[in-house]
Every structure is written in C-alpha cells, then in structure tokens.
Amino acid sequence: RHFRDSLNLGRLIAARAGRMFTYDILRQVLSLALIRDHVSLAGDGPGALVIGDGFGVMTSLLALAAPKRKIVAVNLTKPLLLDMTYVRRAVPEATVALAETNADMRAALADPAVRVIAVQADNAAIIERAPIGLAVNIVSMQEMNPETIAAYFAILLSHTALAVLVVPLALRVGWLAYNQDFKRHARLARWTLPIWLYVSLTGVVVYWLLYR
C-alpha cells in the first residue's frame, strides 16, 4: 500500500545525496513500504532505531516518512560519520545530534529541533534512554548464517539475564566486605565472580559477532 510513496522518498534521497538509485536504496524502500503497511508512522509517537545503516538510507527514509518522530542511528564510528554525512544531504532540514553519554541522549530527546540522534556502537547502551517504537537492523546480521544468528541470540539471552543478576550480587558482595563479614562475603563471591566473568566475556563475544 505504501510502495509508491516510499519509492518517491527513495528517489528524493538519491537525488539530494547525488547518488544513483541503486539496488541497495530499492531494498531499503521495499523494507520501509513493508514496515508502513504494518506500523503507523504518522504523527507523534515513539522514535525509531536504525542499527548498521548504509549511507544513511533507512535513517533518511524514516526521517522523511515520520517527520514528527526522532530517529536514533547506531553504527561503528567511521560508518556512522558516513551515514550522517548522507543524512544531512538527503534531509537537510533535519538537525543531527551526536549522543555519547546518557546526558547527551536526554538533551537530544528533549530538544525539539533534533530529528536524528547519532550513537557510536561503543556507546550503544545509552539507547535504553530513548523511547523506541520501531527497531530496524540493516547490516549487523545480513552476512551471518542461521547457525551464527542462533548462537548470537543464545549468548545474548544468557548475557542479558546474568548481567541483570550480577548487579545486586556485586553490590551485596561489596557491602559484606565493607562490613567485614568476610565469611558470607567469600561464600557469595564464589558464585558472583564466575557470573561476572561470564557476563564480561560474552559481552565481548556479542560485540564481535555483530561487528566483526
């Protein structure tokens, strides 16, 4: 239902960016049309998250299709710079802000002039501050085979669950040591340390699987 309008947006982006209307742009146009068939982007509402965009195409499409919503774009540092360069060409009326900290994210979300929020992959944890109603993963998994994707989500699930668990455990261990209750401290630390090590290592693995 939304293909024709999405196609016109894609052609507008290509013209403004000084690019040919490539297969990659067409692929993003088709993705946007499918999204709009199932998700309303009209009016105010939660923002959209774009992970691993290429030349800022999906970010630009969403910024044009949902002009009253904020778009959060996450990528590695150099690709993110390229993405934002093309977003500024394709959507010149959109103000782009770089968010590196939670405070930056809050400020960008509160500023009505900011339309696109750029986040480096190393700082991706701050996106939890943003109200996201739609998440689009462009590049991060398209070259993964099904076995790798399954392994990724298995690791991510255990990593996330244990990351939540390790916080109160670590605080409790620290509190027991502070109060010199070393017997209970040692008993709890025996479980907390391997969990913390697992969370630390799987965090690296998850990042490697996404951005290798």
Image: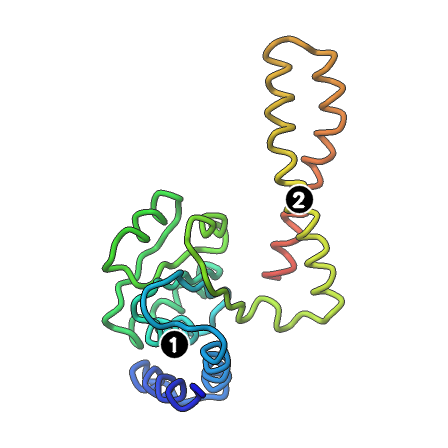
Instruction: Look at label 1 and name its amino acid.
Output: Leu
Residue 70: % across, % down: 35, 62
CB-based contact (under 8 Å), mark 2 and mark 1: no
Residue located at (76% from left, 67% from top): 147
Relative placement, left or right, of 201 versus 33 is right
Instruction: Look at label 2 and name its amino acid.
Output: Ala
Quadrant for the C terminus, please: bottom right
Q: Is residue 47 above or below residue 190?
A: below
Residue 128: % across, % down: 47, 49
- Label 1 Cα crowd, 10 Å radius (few <14 / some 14-19 / many 20+): many
Q: Foreground: 25 or 5?
A: 5
Please tell me whether mark 1 sits on a helix, a strand or a loop. Answer: helix
**Of the numbered discs in the image, which one, if any, rests on residue 61?**
1
Q: Nearer the viewer, mark 2 or mark 1?
A: 2
Quadrant for the N terminus, please: bottom left
Residue 101: image quadrant is top left
Residue 94: % across, % down: 27, 68
Please tell me whether mark 2 sits on a helix, a strand or a loop. Answer: helix
**Of the numbered discs in the image, which one, if any, rests on residue 161?**
2
